[in-house]
Image: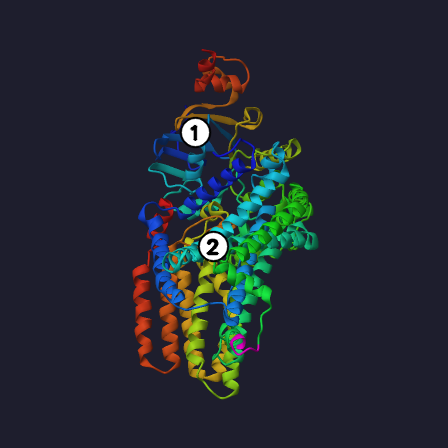
Amino acid sequence: MLAGEGMAVTDALALRELSKTFKAPAVDRLDLVVRQGELYALLGPNGAGKTTTLRMVAGLLKPDAGEISVFGIDALADPIAAKRLIAWAPDEPMLYDQLTPMEYLEFVAGLWGVEPRAARERAEALLRFLDLWDVRGQRCEGFSRGMKQKAALAGALIHEPRLLILDEPLTGLDAAMARQVKDLLQQRVRAGGTVILTTHILEVAERMADRIGIMQHGRLLAEGTMSELRALAGGAGGALEDVFLEITGAGSADAA
Amino acid sequence: MIGRPGSATWLLGHEIRLAWRGLLARRGRRGFAAWGPPAIFIAVLLAAGVPLGRLLENAGPLTGAPFVVLAAASLAAIFLLMLSQTLAAAADTLYERGDLDLLFSSPVGPRKALAVRFLGVALNLYLTFGAFLGPLAISIAIVAGPRWLGALVVLAALALAASAGGLVLAVGLFRLIGARRTRSGAQVASALIGAAMFLGTQGHIILSDGRDSLWRALWRAADEGRLTPPAILALPLRAILGEPVPLAILAAGAVAIYGLANLWLGARFAADAAAAKGAASPLQRQGREAARFVGGAFPAVVRKELRLLFRDSALLSQVLLRVLYLIPLTVLLARSAARGEAIAIPGAAAAVVFMAGQVAGSLSWITISAEDAPDLISCAPTRTRTILRGKLAAALLPLAVLLLAPLAAVTLLSPGAGLATTAAALAAALCSGLINIWHQKPSRRGEFRRRRGATWYALWAEATVCGAIAGAAALAALGSWWALAPAALAAGLMLVLRRSERQVAEALRAA
């Protein structure tokens, strides 16, 4: 495991001994490093602690213990500086039904203090890319789930975050929309951005991610590229699904 | 549950259970905190019924023309209030039906499902008004004889007729202005009914310079024989007095109206409810297309909150309703000014200040607590203080515009009083805003109507502080130094209510 070692300043995200307990431990002394410019997929069964981890990184939850470093900034000591670099896009879009996509982008750009002229240009580019330009003047209340998801994604990207964190970004998207979002994420990574995402669609992680981390019971069970994970799982099958089930123990339990 | 699964009684049982659980969830507290206040309220009403019952028992025959007019007018007022309530409820049935899709897709059939839901509307209406009038009627009946229980039957008849009326109006609105606007239309219409009633009764007081109420005028007119009510108007009074035939006529009439409305509307409503679902996406409401990006979080927050405020028709109609109540006051003020009397100024000052605090309370509650994307705000690189200031500013800006006219009127009449009123209105508005920041209760904006605002504690604090400041304004308008006493009380209360930023954050985390 690479986790915990070499917290270089160039790491996009470095977690050390991160812990959070609600009724039971949700995240348990987690060490995790995401390098700059990579697309990192965090996988795990329901209740593994993925969302709790990411919410702590986004500054929405206070950890009980541990350290969070975002591009070398101590996110617990200086949350505002860290938040400036991060965008958080949860599976439930953070939208206002009574605002139009354009008004929403205005608001988010204002919150992140984006310079107005740059914000306007980016808003237009994002809305055009995500096929929302024609509905930019319509209130989000009438949007389909996929359109809402895309509007929220545009909001996450309007301030050009260096670290983009997405929780189940493809939930509720049809095939065409999912392709758009995947293209956008890959484009971000090619441009040097860092993306962390959680997903239940294992093919997406398999095809898109540079590295994959598998979590269970609040800890990182395994991590690496697809081939590294295959080796770790003792050559279990070929697809990520087999590797995942092998590592989390669900495969053997099911087989038993 | 009662009845065969799928039968109307079984479905009604389901509705009642849901309504009951909703009521429990809304109260949110357990034990005495939940049931104490309503129990005390009912006990007070029961106690108040005793002297009233004595009075009625010894009053002799109550069948004269003045009583007939008074009973008919009171029932008309209750009917209008009920109508204004059902109208909104019926529109909700059309819109926020939630489980109607499930019911419609089941073999129960839309007609039966709707009939039961309509009955639920009527029952809800009856229980709401019955909570006030029921205990009174019961203790009057105990003191003055069981015939007074007829009042409860009359109330039920009114509730049935009012629900039928509300449903017919809602479907009419639907046909007239379409699916999407029906809900806002119903809210505005129900607010207007309330306002019309208020203005109708207050109008008379104003025209008589505050010396005569509409009720008293009606009474006198009937007493002096200027107003002879037709025989049919005596029906309600005789029913209230427990005469069996009028009671039966009223009840049968109401059931017939209700049944007819149900029969006639059932099919139509089912079609409309289906149409409402379909209309949700294609009919898009436009906002601005052109971007007007501004730098900085504060202006962005103010702008976003103002947009959301002005797009919330339920909220707007509520606020406008409160402002409507200022009209009689302004007229009264203008009339006394025209005659060169300044007698109404202290009262006006107090009313304007109290209203300012109350409207500021509603608006700041909605901008501060009703945040639909709290996570977005939390993960933004902006200080909480900046966000809250923006939200407060957005709540106070529209209020400032609303207050311009009454404040100008008071200032014209008496500059000193105008200054005091302006300062006090500002203080009341700010205090209400601060209380809403200190005692936030986050929830989604859509729940505003159901939850009716903040915690009871915050509401109580707001009313008390605003009342104290209003009192100070009235005394200051009189030029009395005693104004300092209520002002000091308000300041003291604010010190007690104050919470630090850290305490607020902790309370929010614990919630």
Q: Amino acid at mark 1?
A: Gly
The vertical placement of A233 against A134, above or below, is above
State which chain disc 2 sits on.
Answer: B
The vertical placement of B187 against B68, above or below, is above
Is residue A165 visible in this depiction of the protein? no
Mark 2 lies on a secondary structure that is: helix
| Percent position of residue B134, x then y | 43, 55
Q: Is residue B108 magenta?
A: no
Is residue B41 visible in this depiction of the protein? yes
| Percent position of residue B33, x then y | 33, 50
**Residue at 57% from the left image edge and 24% from the top image edge:** A203
Mark 1 lies on a secondary structure that is: loop
**B511 on left or right of B448:** left
State which chain disc 1 sits on.
Answer: A
Q: Magenta span covers which residues?
A: B221-226
Q: Quadrant of the C terminus of chain A?
A: top left
Q: Amino acid at mark 2?
A: Leu
The vertical placement of B384 against B202, above or below, is above
Q: Is residue B222 magenta?
A: yes
Who is closer to the viewer here, B83 or A184?
B83
- The residue labelled by disc 1 is A47
**A144 on left or right of B383:** right
Mark 2 → mark 1, Cα distance in angstroms: 54 Å
Who is closer to the viewer here, B467 or B284?
B467
Image quadrant assignment for residue B437: bottom left
Camera-side mark, 2 or 1 = 2
| Percent position of residue B239, x then y | 51, 59
- The residue labelled by disc 2 is B152
**B374 on left or right of B458:** right
| Percent position of residue B17, x then y | 47, 40
Who is closer to the viewer here, A121 or B376?
B376
Quick check: marks 2 and 1 in contact, CB under 8 Å? no
